[in-house]
Amino acid sequence: MHLEKTFAMKTSAVLYRSALYVIFCLLGPCLLEARQPYNVLFIISDDLTYTALSCYGNKVCRTPNIDRLAERGVRFTRAFCQGTYCGPSRASLMSGYYPHATGALGYTNPRPMIGKRPTWSQYFKQRGYYSARVSKIFHMGVPGGIEQGGHGADDALSWTERFNSPGPEWKAPGDGETLENNPDGLKPVMGGNTFVVVEADGGDEVHSDGKTATKAVELIRKHRDEPFWLGVGFVRPHVPFVAPRSYYGPYTPYERMPLPEKVKGDWEDIPKAGINYKTSSNMKMDLRRQRKAVGGYYASVAYMDAQVGKVLDALHAAGIAEQTIVIFTSDHGYHLGEHDFWAKVSLRDESAAVPLIISVPGKKPGVCHSLVELLDLYPSTAALCGLETPPHVQGRDISGMLDDPTLEVREAAFSVAPMRKGFLLREQRYAYIQYGEDAGQGVELFDTHADPGQFVNLARDPSHRTQLTRLQAGMQAKLKAVRDHDLPPKATAAP
């Protein structure tokens, strides 16, 4: 009898353990996910054109670390910023509003316009995430703000902690040359928003981006056991083009740097407002200086890419790569001599389009050609993390594209260049640009299938009158929808 009772007890224990094992196998992953929600690692470069990355087809510039992220994530080929210079773009993607919805058209913090509405990182912070930024996420002046090490136009309410990464910028010891407005070569190396190349002495951590990578690695190690939203802002390749000397080797001698196609009479069919604020002509950059500008830019990109690699390595070393959504992008694009334009502000593809790579654990890698906006990152990460999207957010959830890259959520991307009252509607085929809300300063229309370089303005072509009329109506509807979206009263900052 005793043996039978003992046998029955052991059998019950075995059955109980077996039942627990089955339950764990079925529900364990869900319970684990509930305990350990996805982290969000948001990496943003400054003034980076997608055309400079080897994973987007560049044959000269080397970006192995961004490339390896692209190999395990989804690379978007038609992603567009909402403002073609730093301030409005960053305020938009972080606030969840288009620039003209809030009026954050310059280099200001959007908080006075959004009131208590949570920014992207703040929304995660309010839901138990550790939220931090390292260096430039909201606007921060480069090089001045980096030299001073201040917060710039940052929003303190968005973060649990925030860290700045001061650096020497154009004052870094090394071999420097001012390329802009220096035809006789007599100007010394200069600060400000000036094309300067410095082949700098010393290693990575002399400069801001090296310090940013080091701090990001430290934070990943420290907060590996709790959910986090970590913004890592690299300031290169924003001018000045400063990087340790070792990164310049592949791009020298500068004379062999390729320049984009130049078309005679390229500006003749576009309005005056469509000519960019920096051109080869008004910067007085001859072909030698243009090639050196490209080489200096590429060296700065290569340096930034190496810092991205350190941050990605830290995720794996901490054992949390499979718990972390990784996003890489830029605040806007950048001209490197296309149309003899340089820098940002323009609404052509080189300036308005951005690189965008999103890697989510368990999702297959791929390439997505659907139109997306940086504004879509806020609602998409909320959806991926099982959070409701705040009703004020104007972006769209593109998380479905990570499973099905053929999915489309919008017919056109919208971007603005407030500095010249410019507006862009970018469809898959047509790019429509107008200057002035009534188009009073001119319009541009490009068929990007027939003319991917956007050299032929079709706005006055009678055969494209129907397309022009349709897009003009679409622009007015978009402007109205942007402004009619729900906003709080003009507000003071939230406590």
Image (spheres, rainbow, N blue to C red):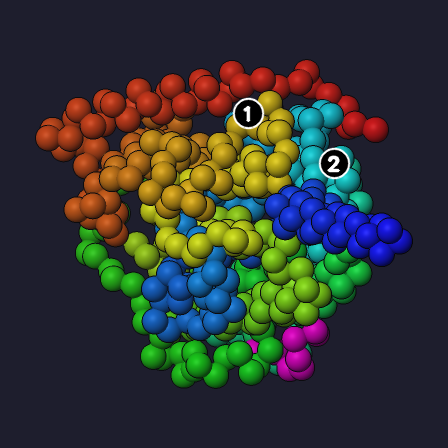
Question: Furthest residue to the front?
Answer: 1
Determine whether 3 is above or below 384 in the image: below
Query: Which residue is at 33% across, 23% downward?
Result: 474
Question: Furthest residue to the right?
Answer: 2
Determine whether 327 is above or below 222 in the image: above
Is disc 2 surrounded by few (<14), some (14 to 19) or many (20+) residues within 10 Å? few
Residue 213 in the magenta stretch? The answer is no
Which portion, as a residue range, is magenta? 199-206
Is disc 1 surrounded by few (<14), some (14 to 19) or many (20+) residues within 10 Å? many
Residue type at tag 1? Ala
Query: Which residue is at 41% across, 83% downward?
Result: 253
Is residue 101 at least partly visible in the picture? yes
Residue type at tag 2? Arg
Query: Which residue is at 34% across, 79% downward?
Result: 256
The residue that mark 2 highlights is: 127
Quadrant of the rendered image containing residue 293:
bottom left
Where is residue 330? Give x, y as percent.
Answer: 52, 52
Mark toward the start of the polypeptide (1 vs 2): 1
Where is residue 128? Give x, y as percent.
Answer: 77, 40
Where is residue 431? Give x, y as percent.
Answer: 29, 38
Q: Secondary structure at mark 1?
A: helix
The residue that mark 1 highlights is: 101
Q: Quadrant of the C terminus?
A: top right
Q: Report, in whole angstroms, how far the alpha carbon at label 1 lies from the one at label 2.
A: 26 Å
Q: Secondary structure at mark 2?
A: loop
